[in-house]
Image: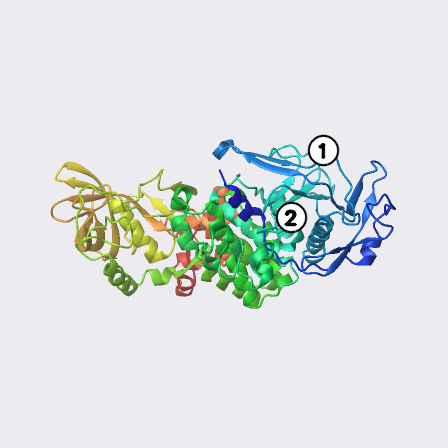
Amino acid sequence: MRRLFARIAAASMTVSVIVSAVPAAMAAQAAEIYPGDGYVRTSPQLYRTFDGSTGCVNCAKETYSNNIWLVDKENNVRVIGDGSYSVSGEGNGRVEQFRTPTNIEPVAADAADWDTKAEMLANVVKVRNYYRNTLNHTDFDFSGSGDQGFYAFEFNNSCDARARISTDNFGKCQDYTANLLGFGEGDQENYFSMGVDVGAVGHEFTHLFVNKELGWWPDKMNTETEALMEAYCDIIGELCEDEPDWMVGADVFRANTYGEKKYSLRDMRNPQGTRNPKFGDIYIDYFDDYSNYKRKLEWLKSNNPYPMHPCYLGTTVIDHAAYLMYEAGISKDDLAKIWYRSVYYYRGDTTKATFVDCRDAVEKAAYYSFGSSSRELQIVKKAFDDVRVKSHRTSLSQATAAVPTRMSDFTRIESYNLPEGRYWNTGDPNTASRVAKYGDTSTYLPMGPTAIKNFVICSWQNEEPYYQCAGFAKKLQTDFFHTDTFVQNSDLSYVPELGDHLRVDQYSRSTYLGTHSVFIRAFDSNTITYADCNSDQNNVIKWNNRVSWYRENDGRFCFSDGLCTYKFVWVERPLKQGDTNADGVLDNNDLVAMDNIISGNISYRMYDGLLREFTADINGDYVVDSADRDILYDLINCRNYARERYGFVIY
């Protein structure tokens, strides 16, 4: 179960409580100003904002119900009476109840919470207008039942917020089929009401938007995708502010009103500097580095030191990338447009989207908004580089990967941490031990998808357990090529290439001993040199195995170290740009596949066709066409310019 603060972190988004007044002209357009009964006066009503300035809102009486509303009829937004929110159950049995009030009560102009509720109305209108006027968003039918507007209200929670569509199954929302925005009323000791904050309102509003367009909804996706969802809500919510402070929830914290802002739910400028009085005067270990987050994610799911879902600890990786884009000079509104438009550039199964998919979508939005050589696109790329979210394409070229001296330099550096004769058994892939531990399998390579067969991704759990010899070969391969996406080929006519992860059957004379993995460091027409570990069943590391190779009568690639014979089973290689049939080799078969893609005979936009799209769109202009085919022809024919320019694919 996500504990309370997990939900706080999810929904109480970026805040800056400087709220501009609703223009009197806009307020005057609201129909049927309710004239009396002590609830409203005959003119639009003033309210006082958090920072002491004033705003202006209308009340109106609905003719069909006689209910009195704080309402902006032009924008179809209204504030209703207080509701409730509660959580019960654990894990998959968790039940959320998010209720609007059964009976609508008027909001008195002199009520204690008048200012809060009036400011909530103004903020929802402000966010809606930012979507409409700046982002050019016109479809506000998030509920799927027609554009029936937005109902905002407070509920009994100290620091939380929720967006809901009343037709979902998260608990009954009585009488309403519109978009619902609920805001915790605050405990008035540590937290103010969430509804008085533009960033919090923008965050919840964006939940409705990304759910409609991408199917993103809390608890319905994997952890990394959920972190992306929260990041989009953080970022667009922050950019709805007049002047972003890039601190999620800073103005909700009461302590921040008495001096320098130091508390936030998430500090987008400096994630690891996030402080929250909920945990005492300590820093929270939010991430600003994707590689670290990805490596620790599985551990966090069961060992999280904070009472929040681990998706929030990774949300700040993407948050920080957006902040870096802003700091590098992309204007607030241009940045908002890039992130908003990127929502429409996700491909495949969006409920399985990764941070790398996010980079691809945001780069594509910048590409089409500002051009391929624009300053904005370069800023976007650098920001993702800085938080170590890789592109779908490596910076390593196919030509560079084939240079023997690069392999020599690589193995020399790699062997500093993993010396000859030490043991790969510490549990940390980057360290080795002086002590053997017989049969130890504690060192796994932490990675995601690793092998592809017919463009279907196979995870290592279902394919090859990457520990001991296979894990060591895969670690070297991943470090060498800067990718974690590999294709497996079992063609017996295998010809060695630098960086191959070669799987072989091992025989002592005629006795079968099992399979083994090696990493190819060098080769010529007679010999190969490979690195491996666990040839002694103790995970010992060896770097300089130089042996002769030959072929059996059936063409199978074989080699011998004098004690044992090794026979080819399969090879894994990084997926190359241009390898449109995913067999690990660039040849005329890829041209055939490319022609089928261009003609539409292969639908490359299906889920497991994403990789086909990334291999076929060689020039990275997001279109597969004859220009990509021309490059592929040059790659197949080893034209140097092509092999020096194009590299490998990351998924």
Which residue type carries mark 2? Answer: Phe
Q: Nearer the viewer, residue 422 or 84?
A: 84
In the picture provided, is 105 more to the left or to the right than 456?
Answer: right
In the picture provided, is 619 more to the left or to the right than 449?
Answer: right
Q: Which residue is mark 1?
A: 102
Q: Nearer the viewer, residue 385 or 245?
A: 245
Q: Nearer the viewer, residue 235 or 517?
A: 235
Which residue type carries mark 1? Answer: Thr
The disc at residue 45 is none
Asked whether residue 649 appears in the rendered view, the answer is no
Q: Which residue is mark 2?
A: 205
- Whole-Å distance between the Cαs marked 2 and 1? 23 Å
Q: Are marks 2 and 1 in contact (CB under 8 Å)?
A: no
Name the residue at 57% across, 68% down.
Answer: 329
Q: Which quarter of the picture shows residue 643?
A: bottom left
Q: Position of residue 2 (x, y in %)?
A: 50, 40
Q: Position of residue 490 (x, y in %)?
A: 31, 42
First in residue order: circle 2 vs circle 1: 1
In the picture provided, is 190 more to the left or to the right than 512?
Answer: right
In the picture provided, is 598 more to the left or to the right than 472?
Answer: right
Tell us which disc is closer to us: 2 or 1: 1
